[in-house]
Amino acid sequence: MSDALQSLSRFLPELILMAALAVVIVADLLTQRRPLKSSTDLLTGITLVGLLGALVTSWQALGAGEAQSLFASMLADDGLLGVFRPIFCLTSIVVLLLSMRSKELEGVRLGEMLALLLTVTAALMWMAGSINLVMIYLSLETVSVASYIMVGYLSSDRLSNEASLKYILFGAVSTGAMLFGLSLLYGMTATLDLYGVRAALAEGAFGPGLLFVLVLIAAGIGFKIAAAPFHFWCPDVYTGAPTPVTAFLSVGPKAAGFAILIRFFYLGLAEPAGGGAIAPVGGADWQMLLMMLAVITMTLGNVAALLQTNVKRLLAYSSIAHAGTMLMAACVLSVEGVQAIAAYLAIYLFMNLGAFTVVILAHRVTGSFEIDSYAGFWKRSPLLTVAMGIFLFSLMGIPPFAGFLAKWYVFAAVINAGLGWLAVVGVLNAAVAAFYYVKILRVMVIDEETGPTPALAFSRLDLGLLVLLVVPNVLGLLFWGSLDRVTEYSQTLLELG
Amino acid sequence: MESMGSAAIFYATAAVVLGSALYVVVGRNLVHSAFALVAAFFGVAVFYVYLGADFLAGAQVLIYVGGILTLLLFGVMLTNRIYNLNLRSGAIQVVPGALSAGLVFALLVWIIQSVDWGAMDSGDPGPTSESIGRLLVGDYLLPFEIASVLLLIALMGAAMLVRRRGSS
């Protein structure tokens, strides 16, 4: 019991989110009869305060105190969790602001959406910290269930319903496969603790049987990060979901999925080999498994994105491709890979949410998500076009922008690990990606508009959001210092021996 | 002699579980399928007893047979024209489905045969509920609490989806 009480002091961001959740639920019930606007404003305010509180406390907790395990070895409070917590909070704050400006969510009661957003933020933190098989499953399932509901939030919209149903069906199958894999792993090792799993696997060779188990578990994790061949839900769900939810899904659960991937493979299935490197245990070549996943995911995502005409679908495939790039870094088998993934995610957060912000703001005037509807956008709003250009160039990884830094971290890690061929595949993919990102820009700048062109008006909130998202992308190279902070802490994984 | 008897019980239960589970999938009548599911769930409860997991067996009967299935049956029976419903299940892609199912089955059999599972012999089975209770408020306190958060949002989501559809 004293352990649980002691753990609470290192659990502050999650506690704040849970408190805000309770307040939002009660406030939602009390304001049911008030006008929609005032009740929504009140609830959004409470949620924003909760998320900001979590952001501040998680930023303060970053790097403070030794890495330790919480709640009887359920969670690891270490540098990796420390780095991921602010990423989740920032994502949720941007998504919250986006959902206030989204045309799709206008006139819809947001109470449940805000409660779900708070829950899912905390659940992402639990995911990133899990070092116990039960916790891995439970936190993943909490994120999934909350996401299913958020995707189907527009219940009078057919596409939203269809997306939610598809998401549930794919999610049920992949979490089922993962649960079965986890139970087999428990049968082999007779422990639920990741460090115990490692110790048990180090003693005996399990070989191909273990590899099959890992494929089952990779299905669950692959579903969360939208890696091929577990990505089939992704384009339909991204297209059908309300756009702020799409923006959230493309960053939050993906980041948490990578945190679980790192914890599961780097801590549970490998032991330290000195100098920050790790060596797989148990006689299963999971490095090969991850490399195959990375190559398939990157290639499929980029090639399929070339064919898209809907901007949400295009960004869905582009997010699959980015997952492939990060998977490359996961094949490195040293802390350098972990650092690269953390740095990539920290930058990806700003560039991808930025692109979705432009999509949502453009949708307010065009009412469409087709790329063709962006024709002549340059004349309607130079500001938004320039912002989109910055986000897309950053996603491409063009030098002055932060996205270049992200790609550079990944490729440096991959090449240092002696996986030159993988880096070549990655570079070829980055070249393919440039085509479809430039396609959007070409339509915005060169193509002539066809119909009437209503003027584009920004609120102060829109401008603030754009500045928040543009600045890190433009000045990415100047923020090298804070990125060093990310990479420095992310490598301190909890070591219990 | 005793092991022969328990083996017989095991195989008989397994036959009941597999047979009724198969009927759930291929059966054409929804009500019959739901009742077949009762038999399958009871069979699983017998397995738990057989393994000395008394608490799990009780929970299985209470939650699956008592709760979920009764609800399911109510749902089925309150639906209009349920008997005329033409259930088309398993009619498409029989060959690829059978092939992949067979492949997974072969893989699983091979793994169960090849891996050293380090079976534990815990002696005579005793009551487990006390130690499970202690674990839930001790080592597994956090998962226990997270499960309550999960149930809360699942409940909220279900209520929301139903309410919106009714009002619009």
Image (cartoon, coloured by chain):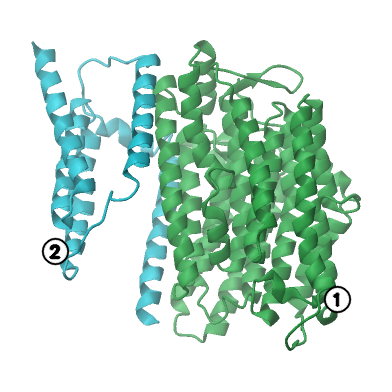
Q: Secondary structure at mark 1?
A: helix
Residue A335 in view here: yes
Whole-percent x, y for residue A227 in the image:
59, 44
- Kindly identify the amino acid type of the residue bearing the numbered disc 1: Pro
Whole-percent x, y for residue A40 in the image:
56, 78
Supply the letter of whichever chain is green: A
Marking on residue B83 = 2
Which of these two is toward me, A445 or B92? B92
Q: Residue at x 15, y 25 (%)?
A: B11
- Kindly identify the amino acid type of the residue bearing the numbered disc 2: Tyr
- In the image, taking residue A397 as reference, residue A307 lies left or right, namely left
Whole-percent x, y for residue B81 in the image:
16, 69
Q: Residue at x 24, y 30 (%)?
A: B53
Q: Chain of mark 1?
A: A
The hue used for chain B is cyan
- Residue at label 1? A382
- In the image, taking residue A433 as reference, residue B145 lies left or right, namely left
